[in-house]
Structures are given as C-alpha cells and as structure tokens.
Image (cartoon, helix red, strand yellow):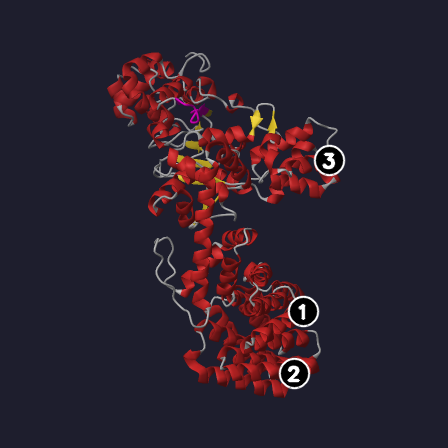
Amino acid sequence: MADAGQLEFGALLRRSRLAASLTIEALAEASGVSARGIGDLERGRRTTPQRGTVAALADGLELGEAERARLLAAARLGRSPRRGLADVRAFPRDIDDFVGREAQLARLTALAGQESGGRPAVVAVSGAPGTGKTTLVLHAALALADRFPDGQLMVDLRGMDDDPPGPAELALHVLKALGVADRELVAAGPQGHAELCRRAVAERRCLLVLDNARDEAQVRPLLPSPGAGMVVITSRRMLTGLESVHRLPLGELSPAEAAACLTAVVGRERAEADPDALAEVAERCAHLPLALRVAGNWLATRTGWTVRRLADRLASQERRLDTLAAGDLRVSAAFHLSYRQLSPGAARLFRLLALVDGPDTGTAGAALLTGQHVFDAEDALEELVETGLLGTDRERYRLHDLLRLYAQDRLAAEEAEEETAAARARLHHWLLETAVAAGRWYEPGHGAPPPDPLGLVDLSTAEHARRWLQAEGLNWLAALRAASARGEHARVVEVADALHWFSDQWIFWGHWPEVCALGAAAAEALGDPLLEAVHLNYLAWALLICESRHRDSLDRSDRALAAARRAGDLPQQGWAHSYTAWALSLLGDHPAATPHNREAARLFKAAGDLHGTLHAMSSHADTLLQAGRHEESVTEHLGALAFLDEAGDRIEPHSAAFSRTNLQTSLGRTYALLENWAEAAEHLRAAVDLAHGSGNPGLESRALIHLADALLAAGHREQARDAYARCLALGAAANPQHVATARERLAGLG
C-alpha cells in the first residue's frame, strides 16, 4: 500500500475498500458510517474525518495495525493546515509588546476549551475605534494555536469600506482558503456557497476570525451551527442582533495597563525617567490602545524627545488629535471611519454631545441638545452606542476624551455658530430649571415640584430628585458657572438657594463651597443685604463642613451677621451666630462658642423658626460634648430629640431625618466617652440605620466609624471589624476622613 504522505485520505480509503473487496454499502454496514459519508470522503468532498469515524472505518475494513496507522496518518494530514487552511503564521504580524487585557485573554482561552454540545464557540469582540480588537484577537490566536489542529483563518470583512463584501463573496473566499475543490464550488453554485462554507468550517477544528464586521447580516450566513471549532468576530458595532454568541466588549485600558503599554514601546529607561509625564501622556491618550500606540511610536522615532515634552504637547486640546498621528496611523482617521457611517440624526447628536460639560449625560439632555422628542434622541444615542462611538453605564452616556475632541472638531466644521449657541442655551436653561425644581424637594415649605411640562425627567419623589441632582451634578454646576459668567445673578442666587437644604444629603460631593461662593457673589452683586446674609451663611457652612476651613468660615458668618442686621432679619442673624458657634467649638474655643449658641437660640425662638431652633439646640449639645461636659451633653441631646419628636411634621422630613441621625450619633459618641458601651452601641446603630435608610453615606460613615471605635473599645473586635468594613465600602460618597480611618483601623486589626 502506498505511503500516507503520498496519498490523500480519500484515495487511501478507496484503495483499502477495494483491496477488501467491499462495496461502499457493505463498508457502511460493517462500519456504521453512512454510505453517503464514505462516498464524500473517497471523492474528496470531505477531507477532515473525525478520529472516531476513521477508527470505525478501520474496524469495518478489518485493517491490521500498520494499515490502521497509515489510515489515521492520512486523516491527520487531511486536517493539517497544509490543506489550504491559513496557518497562524499567515496571520498579520502580531506586536511584540502586547500588554494588558488579561481578563479578556483568559475568557477567550476558556471559550476555546469549552465543550458546547457539538456547537462551535462564537465570540463577538466589540469596542470603540482604537480599542485594539484585532490586536487582541491576533494575540489570542497565537497563544491558542495548539487548540486548533486544523488551523486558523483570518478574514478581513472590510466593514468600514463604502462597499464591503457581502456574505456570498466572503463565503467563497473562506471556501477557497479551506481548499474546497472547484468542482464542489461549481456544483453548489453561488446560492449554495454559504451552506457549503458553514459545513466546511463545521468539519474542522479550526479558529475562524471574521475581522472588522460591518453588521450582523454580513456575518450571520457564515456561522456554522454544528462543529468543534471557534469563530471570533471583531466589530466596532455591538452586533446586538446575533444570537447565541459570547460577547466580549473592549473599553479603554486601565491607567496601569496604559503606562505599561507606553513603557513597552518607548523603553523602560525613558519611561522611568519621568513616570508622572508618562501617566499624563497615557491620560491624554484617554488610555486608548491606538492613541497609546501612536504616542509610543512618536517617542520611539524621536529619541531626542523626553516623555515630558510629548506630555506638554498633548496638553493642548486644540492640537491633541493632530499630534496623535504617526505615519499612516491617525487616531482621528479611525474615528472618522465610524462617524461617516452614522445616520444624519445620530451624526448631529454626536457633534452636539461635545457641548456636554460633564463626563456624561442622560437621554433628556440629549433631547434638549437636538430639540428632538426624547424617544428619537434615545434612538440616536443607541445608534452611537451600537457603532462604538458612545459608552454607556445604565442610563448615562459618555464620550471618552479623544472622541469628545473629535466631536468638537466636527461641531466646529459642520454646525452653524448660532445653532451651537442655541443648543447650549437650551441645555443650560433646562439644567438650572430642573436643579431648582429638584432641590426644592428638600427645602422647608416646598416639597414636590409641579410636573415637568416637557416630560423629560421624573421628579415625582424626593429620591428621584436626588438621583437626578447627583447624576447631572457636574452638568448643572457647569451651567451655573456659565450663568455666573454671564452676570445672571438672580438665576445664580435662585439655584444656590434651592440646593442649600439638599446639600445635607450629599455633603462630600466636593463642590458645595464653589456653589455657595457663586451664590454669595451674585447676592452681593444684586445689592440685597438679606440675600447677601443668606448666601454668606451658606458659604460659612460649606467652608466649615466640606473643607474644614474654620477661620474662613468665621469670616463669612461674621459678614453674614452684619448683612442680616442691615436687613433686620432675625433668622439669618440666628444662623450667623449658630455657624460662628460651630466654628469656634471645632477650634476648641468652647467658652466663646456658648454665648453664640444662646443668642442663636433666642433669635430663632423670637422668629418662630423651628428648624433654626432645632439646629441651635443640637449645636449647643455638641459644644458641650467638645468641651468634655458629657453628662450635660447627654441631657441637651435628649432634649433636642424630644423637641424634634414634639415638632412632628412641622419639621421638613428630610431635615428631620438628618437632625435625628446627627443627634443619635452624638449621643452614641457621648455615651462612649462615658464608657457606657451598651447605650453607645444602641444609639450609634440607630444612627447607622437612619443614615442608611435616608441614603446619606456621609452621615452613615460618621455613625459607622464611631460605632466601630466603640465596639473595639468594648472588646468586640469582630463586630468592630464589620463596622469598619462597612464604612470603607461606602467609598467616595462618604466622609473621606472616616474612610481613611476605617482603612487604617482594619489594617491594624489584621
């Protein structure tokens, strides 16, 4: 019998069958392999029989050991990449300095070895332009080469072309690469190529990469149903319409991965010479792999440049995209390929999203920018998400920094200046109007606002108002800055006033001192002493609580008192005294704080201001606590709680919950100082529950840290550890000092 290296499997099978004097039908009966299957194998229509099929045929032919080995060897030869299936060595060249994406590589590796009940694993790798989809898949293919003994094939679907190839053309390309005989192609005809392609892929344990897909329709006809191989599709689109696929979305790299990527290109010595500059370059590349690659290549070819020089060049937003070009690699060109495929409505929204000041926006903001109905704006947003030009996190939409710069370029080039100005004005007006309506939920004497006439946002509950104010915080803050710059003093005062009571619910946002400073400046510009007193008091609170600038707070409360006296307003005089007492107490001057607390209480009582009276009582109790007069402090705190209970619904509910939480926390602290651990834990746990129930992480972190300290002092280490961990888990919304303390205490506990 001829050597297996000289005969294809089909010819060897036919020779063995004839030597055994068997017809195809007789061999089928003896082996259990269908007559049609045997015929296809002998005629070369199938070239990659499974090992089990070969073993069954060898049994049916009653082959000896040597003949069986030759038949198996011929079958393996039929599955070899030399049969025309592109070996991984024929793939585009991988990059030697690939870094990061460990989680995604691990997922692809796991899917490559996963048993799928006879179905091939199909993976859709999607992401924005420049996220490195093709590079990732190519790198994975090299690592997984031994998983696919029948080879690997990569097909560029040219999805960004004006006229990309259709499924029929692509199927023919794959069939030719697989070495399917011309007679079979002719017999199947153009209409049958897709089915023939699916069958040919299914017969091989191979990796098929469909790179740069335009849409679902281009790839769906090529996906095999049965088979033991793997198909990986890359696309800028999410390919939402594909069924039964594993999805692998790619975003930007982490800061550490981005720095490692640059280091791999420019060399460790240059990178470590100025790590701060390297981090700035990575940040100004938005941690986008393509931009990092361009920046790295720029430095690699300009050995006289320091990393700092490139970082400074990229600092200019106006020329950043122009700088991110190296040879034929241009970041803006990658963006443009996707932009030109957008519908007109989506393209206009993409341009106008450059006007969003904060990091993200919602559907309502997009509708205001374009003047569309909210449902139409949502459709346009989802088109941008589908094409990879817009990121999404729940109900928020975000342009990364480089895409924002590209959108700004398109806006300047394609949108009339008056249209741009009108869109920005619409957005800012709506943001400030809605901020006022939402903030009033928390202000005594207001409550629920009237329904939104535009139907853009639901403010039907205080919780909905809170979520909107927090989600749009940086956007309405930017609108407030713009109003201040335009001299719209009345609007600025209105917004700052509406948000003052809400600020207790979001104390550690980080921007209340600025909001209050804008309000105070606007009030001063209006020349109204009462408004000036109100907003100077707000600023005194913000400086005291948000930034611990006690002496600056004293200056503002002193000026507020003078303005309130000019206006003849008793409540604002009371608030000025109360904030003065608070600052003096925190500075340790308790004797000086006491008369201010008393005067505040007198003024609030004379004015009939229940909210002010409650605050003065709480402040006096805290001053006693700070002064070490613990028994008196307990009495005063209990008195304030009794006053709060008696006032009932005359105290605004959110203000009542805020005050009750603070009073319970202070009572717990006082009992802890008295070493009455049971009472301390009871009040502090009540405070934790109140803060958590009202959704106030700032107050919750305060109560938790004092609860944990009390528990630790009482010897309850595990309970203390749990409380510290809960405080740490509150994250950025909590008091940063308490979070830092919790981290330090946990480390000390091991």
The quarter of the picture where the N terminus appears is top left
- The residue under label 2 is 594
> Where are the magenta residues, as a range?
154-164
Q: Residue 196, relative to residue 714: is it above or below?
A: above
Q: Amino acid at mark 2?
A: Thr
Q: Amino acid at mark 3?
A: Arg
Distance from Cα at disc 1 to Cα at disc 2? 18 Å
Distance from Cα at disc 3 to Cα at disc 2? 61 Å
Q: Where in the figure is residue 739, as x and y percent of width and height?
A: 61, 63
Q: Which mark is residue 270?
A: 3
Within 10 Å of disc 1 (Cα), the crowding (few <14, some 14-19, many 20+) is few
Q: Is residue 590 in view from this perspective?
A: yes
Q: Is residue 238 in view from this perspective?
A: no
Front residue of 361/99: it is 361
Front residue of 710/612: it is 612
Badge 1 marks a residue whose secondary structure is helix
Do the residues bearing badges 3 and 2 touch, measured as CB atoms within 8 Å? Answer: no
Q: Residue 258, relative to residue 651: is it above or below?
A: above
Which sits earlier in the primary sequence, circle 3 or circle 2? 3
**Within the image, what quadrant is residue 173 found in?**
top left
Magenta span has 629? no
- The residue under label 1 is 555
Front residue of 297/141: it is 297
Residue sitting at 46 percent across and 21 percent down?
80
Q: Where in the figure is residue 228, as x and y percent of width and height?
A: 39, 32
Which sits earlier in the primary sequence, circle 3 or circle 1? 3
